[in-house]
Image (cartoon, helix red, strand yellow):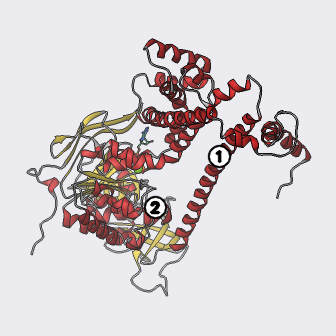
Amino acid sequence: MNRLSPFNVVSLTFGFAFLYLPMLILVIFSFNSSKLVTVWAGFSTRWYGTLFQNEAFLDAAWVTLKVAVMSSTFATVLGTMAAYVLVRGGRFMGRTLFSGMIYAPLVMPEVITGLSLLLLFIGIGMDRGVMTIVLAHTTFSMCYVSVVVSSRLATFDRSLEEAALDLGASQFDAFRLVTLPIIAPAVISGWLLAFTLSLDDLVIASFATGPSATTLPMKIWSSVRLGVSPEINALSSILIGIVSVGVITASLMSKRHAVRVRREEQAAQRAT
Amino acid sequence: MAQTVFAPWDDPQQKPLIQFVGVTKRFGDFVAIDDLTQDIYEREFFALLGPSGCGKTTMMRMLAGFEAPTEGSILLSGQDIAGVPPNKRAVNMMFQSYALFPHLTVWDNIAFGLRRSDMPKDAIAARVEEMLKLTRLSKFGRRKPHQISGGQRQRVALARSLAKAPKLLLLDEPLGALDKKLRQDTQFELMDIQETTGTTFVIVTHDQEEAMTVASRVAVMDEGRIIQVATPEKIYEAPNSVYVADFIGDVNILEGTAKANGPESYAIDWGGAEPATATSARPFSDGQKAHLAIRPEKIAISAERPADAANAVQGKVLDIAYLGNLSTYHVELPTGQVIKAQSANTRRVSRRAYTWEDPVWLSWSATAGVLLES
Ligand SMILES: Nc1ncnc2c1ncn2[C@@H]1O[C@H](COP(=O)(O)OP(=O)(O)OP(=O)(O)O)[C@@H](O)[C@H]1O
Ligand SMILES: [Mg+2]
């Protein structure tokens, strides 16, 4: 085994401290029994209790969840379709322009995206609320899905689709029965990405929303302006927990899948 | 009972199943298929042979509908198939890369095409089982492609393309990964299938022996062109060019100038002690450059000069390759040229007649070689 040199140990320590110390402090203080966020007064879970009685937070959480599920689903459908056309469509007129335009929102300042959406919603006289946030989130997260899916499609063996067509499948069947099941992991991670993006978006949601809908980040942001409360710490700790569990599960799943494939291959080689 | 010879290409009444008419395929500037015109008849077993990159797969892909000809047209039963998408063509293809669906079991891979038709469920199951049995994969139906060996995968690909019993079956190197025994069995299986179903086969192979065994006609290709199309015997015995002679099997080439010395008979001055005599239906003018191609098995090897041979040269044995049923002698001539002569090992090799450095005589008849223009 390689031993780490002292230099590597130091850089590793500092790097991880930089990344995780703020979160660690936040989680620790969420268990503080004092109402003052910065003064430690013993361990307690009371803020978790009061959090679950706070109607406003629970409402906001529900809105956020609805928005995230709907927008990431739409974004996944649209983003996958866009990726498919861009990778598979061959050279059609304006392909370069289209692919450039799909990826532009990745680097577009959020304020501008939000503002332009707001103007659009006002222009067409749409009532702002959950639906407009969903639309806005779909718009900006679909390009992320499209990036993830198209990088998978680029390495996808095209002859598989050709084989499906050759065996009499329609274009749509070839996609549904062959392409989609194979690129499913990329589509799912695209969905997860869109879901997370929607979950923590503040800027665009603030532009797109109306008085009827408040998302969790908006709620946190507005209450922090009145001072950080231990409840916010508790809420944030829960979010950190959810995200970590999700990430760890996803990586464990993919690792287990890789191990299984390898084992099965070895078994097959022994059998012959 | 006299068997009628299967040779629809000689019969002007026969309508070809496939016609390539002046087909050119370009990828950018690169010409993959160069102005190709060729007919393929129903029930044929048409083998494409040629070096890597000569355009064999490209020809197949055009038939299957994955590539469109840049120029010219392809007719199937007299109909231009330019506008017909791959899934509407009664053509199935076995891919060189197999292209098995990795997420489906062997069973489902084979059933894939059948499920796209309106075949009833139990008929599909019966057909899949039949295919599994044919390719000796019955034990592996439940496995996924990554759980079987390379040769087994190749057989799955073959079974999948055979399952729909198409009118035209395109096989791109279908048997390359199989061992010799299984390959021969499968070859005969293919010929059987062909006989019972009347399917037309176009098959790409790198294995000449395979082409010779299964094909009704062999097409030798080079750089996007078909150099010669003929029955296996014709290709072997009467190649039309040095390229074909050299590509199919082993051959000795004597290069020289021709001079008529009788009706359809020529003396070729190739730099040896005396000119070689060869007959040729193809006319040569005096002093024309000519290549005399002689197969090793048509050259006899002896210790003494045979009295009645039309051609005889002396040399010494350089090398002996023992191939089991045959031995190939590499004999160096005084000119420095090395000639290969082959003889059957009819007796057990307890006593080899010739050994290294032995002086020997090589002889062949006037009809043994083919005289080719350069
Ligand atoms: N999509 C493509 N774009 C550009 N060039 C191509 C494409 N497909 C094939 N070619 C070129 O066309 C030529 C013929 O290719 P093809 O696949 O038909 O060869 P092949 O005879 O099947 O060779 P092999 O025996 O190695 O399979 C090759 O030089 C190849 O590089
Ligand atoms: Mg090929």
Question: Does the CB distance between marks 2 and 1 fall below 8 Å?
Answer: no
Amino acid type, mark 1:
Val
| The N terminus of chain A - image quarter | bottom right
Q: Quadrant of residue B199?
A: bottom left
| Residue B137 lies in quadrant | bottom left
Pick whichever, B254 or B24, lies toward us: B24
Residues packed near mark 2 inside 10 Å, few (<14), some (14 to 19) or many (20 plus)? many
Q: Is mark 2 within 8 Å of ligand 2?
A: no
Q: Which residue is mark 1?
A: A247
Which of B119/A26 is in front? A26
Q: Is residue A162 left or right of residue B331?
A: left
- Across and down, in percent, residue B345 comes to 41, 80
Q: Secondary structure at mark 1?
A: helix
The residue located at (16%, 41%) in the rendering is B79
The numbered disc on residue B145 is 2
Chain identity of mark 1: A
- Kind of element beneath mark 2: helix
Visible residue check, residue B84: yes
Q: Is residue A44 left or right of residue B324?
A: right
Q: Residue at x 49, y 59 (%)?
A: B337
- Left or right of B1 in this view: B329: right
**Residue type for callout 2:** Pro
Q: Does residue B252 appear to the left or right of A187 in the view shown? A: left
Q: Nearer the viewer, mark 2 or mark 1?
A: 1
Residue B272, horizontal then vertical, whole percent: 43, 58
Q: Quadrant of residue A106?
A: top right
